[in-house]
Amino acid sequence: MVFFTLERTVPLPLPEAWRRLTEWPRHADAVPLTRVRVRTPPPDRVGTVFVARTGVGPLFFDDPMEVTVWDPPGEDTPGRCRLEKRGRVVLGWAELEVRPGPGGRARVVWREELAVRLLPAVFDRPLEAAARTTFGRAVNRLLRQP
């Protein structure tokens, strides 16, 4: 199991940074070879479930997630969302936090604990490096694109 934190400061109001990070289907455009399907009706809230399917053709895995904390930000108040990963392959959780940053910018913090079932601990360091790179790029894309 690995744990990592990503932090970004962006020239966006808090609600806009939040929207860009929590519109779950947008994650498909930010993570290569991934599609996202939301299984519960809007609006997003505690109990929202979505599945990220990653792979090509018959070689894929599903990463089902459930929102367990949903506290959107105000104009000047922080927001936090926690996702529990409930898959057969990928386990763990992710927390997305949007809070006021310097100069009216948004400070984004993404924390994740990630495990791949049956993957020996000897692979933790490569898994962390791959996850940090993949999710770092995804966060950058999500925050850049309206």
Image: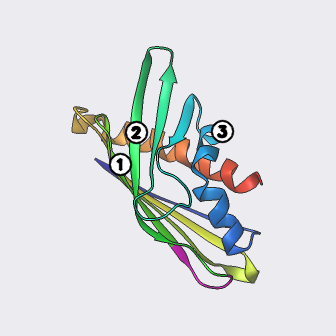
Give me the C-alpha separation between circle 3 and circle 1.
20 Å
Evaluate whether residue 21 shows in this view: yes
Q: Nearer the viewer, residue 47 or 89?
A: 47
Q: Residue at point 72% right, 75% down?
A: 105
Helix, strand or loop at mark 2: strand
- Percent across and percent down for residue 143 are 69, 56
Q: Is residue 96 magenta?
A: no
Q: Quadrant of the C terminus?
A: bottom right
Dot 1 alpha-carbon crowd within 10 angstroms: few under 14, some 14 to 19, many 20 or more: many
Give me the C-alpha separation between circle 3 and circle 2.
16 Å
- Going by the numbered disc 2, the residue's amino acid type is Asp
Q: Earlier in the sequence, mark 3 or mark 2?
A: 3
Coloured how?
Answer: rainbow
Q: Which residues are magenta?
A: 75-79
Q: Nearer the viewer, residue 126 or 92?
A: 92
Which disc number belongs to residue 68?
none
Helix, strand or loop at mark 1: strand
Q: Residue at point 62% right, 72% down?
A: 107
Please give left or right for residue 56 compared with residue 66 in the image: right
- Percent across and percent down for residue 144 are 75, 54
Q: Main secondary structure of the magenta part?
A: loop
Vertical placement of residue 93 versus 28, above or below: below
Helix, strand or loop at mark 3: helix
Q: Residue at point 28% right, 47% down?
A: 1
Please give left or right for residue 104 compared with residue 90 in the image: right
Residue of label 2: 63
- Going by the numbered disc 3, the residue's amino acid type is Asp
Residue of label 3: 29
Evaluate whether residue 114 shows in this view: no
Residue of label 1: 85
Please give left or right for residue 116 compared with residue 60 in the image: left
